[in-house]
Amino acid sequence: MDKKNIDQFEVLRKLDSKSNYSQRKLASELGFSLGKLNYCMKALRKKGLVKINNFKNNPSKLNYVYILTPKGISKKVQLTMNFMKKKMQEYDELKAEIEKKSKINVDNYKDK
């Protein structure tokens, strides 16, 4: 999964757990700048993955509700599956490397 997909996955994951973030709070929790979050949100909205509503009666106009669309939920599931597959592959590779090094160490010990 490339960096852009990871960023979008993280945004979708956060929005799925809580939809009424301020952009500043969401950016802070994700470790993003406001500009990066805006870029990400626009891309997600353009793809039809997120719907953005503001509270029209709120005088500050700072509060928004971010709603995952059905397409957004599906994409989040797909990205989650890809993320988990990658992590499992990394785990298997690390496990094989540890087993290989353990075998080499045991063989070296037997040779002494």
Image (tube, rainbow, N blue to C red):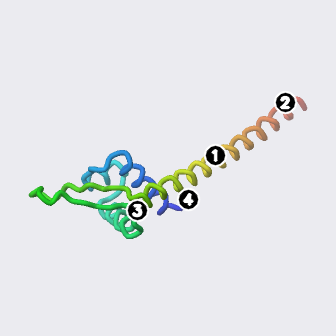
Q: Quadrant of the C terminus?
A: top right
Choose mark 4 or mark 3, whichever is in front.
3
Sequence-wise, the earlier of marks 3 and 1 is 3
**Which residue type does callout 4 highlight?**
Met
**Residue at figure coordinates x 20%, y 55% from the top left:** 63
**Which residue type does callout 3 highlight?**
Leu
Instruction: Residue 51 in the image: state x and y as whole percent.
Output: 32, 61
Sequence-wise, the earlier of marks 2 and 1 is 1
Are the two marked residues, 4 and 1, in contact with CB atoms closer than 8 angstroms?
no
* Residue occupying the far right of the picture: 111
Gap between marks 4 and 1, in whole Å? 13 Å
Sequence-wise, the earlier of marks 3 and 2 is 3
Say left or right for 103 vs 54: right
Gap between marks 3 and 2, in whole Å? 57 Å
Sequence-wise, the earlier of marks 4 and 3 is 4
Q: Which residue is mark 4?
A: 1
Q: Which residue is mark 3?
A: 49
Choose mark 2 or mark 4, whichever is in front.
4
In the figure, 10 relative to 99: above or below? Answer: below
Instruction: Residue 60 in the image: state x and y as whole percent.
Output: 12, 57
Q: For numbered disc 1, what is the local secondary structure?
A: helix
Q: Which residue is mark 1?
A: 88
Instruction: Residue 17 in the image: state x and y as whole percent.
Output: 37, 45
Gap between marks 2 and 1, in whole Å? 31 Å
Are the two marked residues, 4 and 3, in contact with CB atoms closer than 8 angstroms?
no
Instruction: Residue 104 in the image: state x and y as whole percent.
Output: 82, 38
Between 103 and 39, the one lying in front of the other is 39
Say left or right for 90 vs 64: right
Q: Which residue is mark 2?
A: 109
Choose mark 2 or mark 1, whichever is in front.
1
